[in-house]
Amino acid sequence: MKKIICLLLALIMLMSVFTGCGRKKDKADKNEETETTDTNEEVIGPVPQNTDPGTDGEGDQSEQGEQGEDGEDFYGPMPEITEEPYEILNPAVMPEGGTRDGVNYVPWDGIVEHLFFHMVIAYPEMAFDGDFKTNDFDDWMVTAGEFKKILNSVYEKGYVLVDIADVWSETTDENGKHAMVKNTLYIPEGKKPLIFSYDDTNYYPEYLENGFPYKLIIDDEGRIASWGYDPDGNEVVSRDLDAIPILDKFVEEHPDFSPFGAKACLSLTGYEGIFGYRTQTTTQGLTAEEEANRQREREAVRPIIAELKRTGWTFGSHTWGHIRLDNRSAEKTAEDTKRWEDEVGDLVGPTNVLFYPHGSRPDGDDVYNTGEVFRHFYDHGFRIFCSVGIESYSKIKDDIGAVICDRLHPDGTTLRWSRDRYLQFYDAKDIIDLSVRPDLGVGWE
Ligand SMILES: [Zn+2]
């Protein structure tokens, strides 16, 4: 009997040791997991890494912050999206009886102006701090404050937003050939249609420590907001520092600026992910852990994309690697397109709009020539091809059934040196904030 009791006791002790070990091990695993998670978040959080030297990508990995730890919050539960009703209408369809909500709609067959922006500068003191990027940011960008003044001005001058994809339609001509046609738009009487596009809304690492937001998020009220750090290193969630929520807010306050619900077409590369989420692969391949992180980033960006779509934003390709298309072979271009489709198109959905990186025209010339690279994009569903220019030029290419167009570019260069060309939208004198920009002169008195 004693023996049996002893045996039982020994058994119980053994079991408790095992259970203890088991628990200990559990804990150890958990700790390991936590640690791994922390490390991972440093890799894929707000200050991400990218090493893909094989592209023309604008990314420069030299300046990476240490604020990654704070990004952990993003993997907590996402706030609920407030599904306030948002109506998107087609401007190519005349409202029944020609009026809607007491507003007369009239046909418009004239030029549809097109302005494009890059990301706007949230903190000019960081962007214009005299480092080697200062003049680039001055050339390419406007500040959040300047952007708000531009919105006010185009609104007061009677422009209303339309989506680029609603301006032209695909059709078949009398010979059965595929063609593009410019639509008659029905817009509120006295108003003028205007397209907005924003290039490189990827939140590139090189921007992050230079006064730009780090990423888009859904805020506590379920709306798109930007997340990042102010110059003192404090976390900031805002709808006033990024061109996307700024326009959302402006349309909330001035619904007649967007009678069809359109916002802007967002031109996306893929080499640093999209909207601040590091969804990209690299040519060196990813470890299993990195791939798991990438998948997590892909899941995290989905609600952002869904909310953008729901509220009138559309998406276009800016190529995966921000590659020049003027001298690129069709074969190399095809590799890039495949990556864009796999990593960006797969998330944002199909698009027929391509924005040329660096404004460089496929095959060196898309106006008088339709080369292999242009045909490649056509074969992949692209119909609207946008460059950059001195006017909102557009031309329907009859040989292939596509449209090419130029966009105007409000930025430091044109604010300083092209005041006259932009007077129909705003007076650069009233917009440019010379108190925050570097002293580079202006071409007007
Ligand atoms: Zn670009």
Image: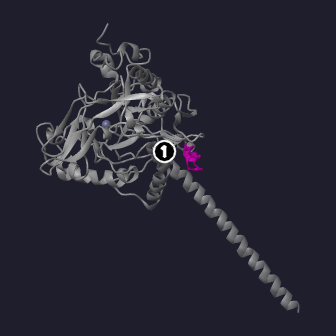
| Dot 1 amino acid type | Glu
> Quick one: 98 or 153, which is closer to the camera?
98
How would you rate the neighbour count of disc 1 (Cα within 10 Å): few for under 14, some for 14-19, many for 20 or more?
A: some
Q: Which of 80 and 90 is in front in this view?
A: 90
- Specify whether residue 82 is painted magenta: yes
Q: Position of residue 80 (x, y in %)?
A: 59, 47
Left or right: 8 as drawn, with respect to 239: right
Tell me the residue at 43%/58% (across/down): 291
Majority secondary structure of the magenta segment? loop
Q: Where is residue 381 in the image (x, y as percent from the top left)?
A: 26, 50
Ligand 1: does it lie within 8 Å of the C-beta at label 1?
A: no
Would residue 232 be seen by someone viewing this image from the given angle?
yes
At a point 30% along the width and 30% down the height, the residue shown is: 107
Do we see residue 116 in this rendering? no
Q: In which quarter of the image is the C terminus?
A: top left
At mark 1, the secondary structure is helix
- Where's the N terminus, which quadrant? bottom right
Relative placement, left or right, of 82 versus 439 is right
Question: Start and end of the magenta stretch?
Answer: 71-83
Q: From the viewer's perspective, tell me whether residue 180 is left or right of residue 252.
A: left
Q: Residue 413 vs residue 277: left or right?
A: left
The image shows residue 101 at horizontal and vertical percentages of 46, 31
